[in-house]
Image: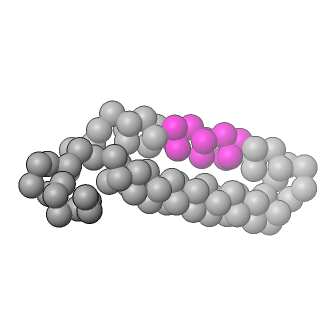
Amino acid sequence: MHRGKNETDVIDERALVYLAVLFVCSALAVLSGAARAAATSGFVTASLEGAYWIGNTLAARYRASVEPVNEDEGSDRYAH
């Protein structure tokens, strides 16, 4: 499966976001304890993955709605 430029950029951005979350949760562990930092890290990670999944689903729907329709399919797809 070939990945487009945008998919690669999104994956790289996710890695940077997770790196930032790791630093923040490490600082939180120093200040408030490892258990709280682990819980926060898990919550943030689950939220990011959920947002990524929803974003991919919505992006796929958008791409499907704006794709050009070929001549034969157009007459079946739209009522005139």
Which corner quadrant of the image does residue 6 belong to? Answer: top left
- Whether 38 is among the magenta residues is no
Furthest residue toward front: 80
Tell me if I can see residue 38 in this picture.
no
Q: Nearer the viewer, residue 13 or 61?
A: 61
Q: Which residue is drawn at the image coordinates 76% and 60% (left, top)?
A: 40
Q: Which residue is drawn at the image coordinates 34% and 46% (left, top)?
A: 66
- Whether 16 is among the magenta residues is yes
Q: Residue 56, how many percent across, how many down?
A: 44, 54
Q: Residue 64, how many percent across, how many down?
A: 32, 54
Tell me if I can see residue 5 in this picture.
yes
Q: Left or right: 49 with respect to 38?
A: left
Q: What segment is highlighted magenta in the picture?
A: 13-23
Q: Nearer the viewer, residue 19 or 53?
A: 53
Q: Which residue is drawn at the image coordinates 51% and 53% (left, top)?
A: 55
Q: Left or right: 26 with respect to 78?
A: right
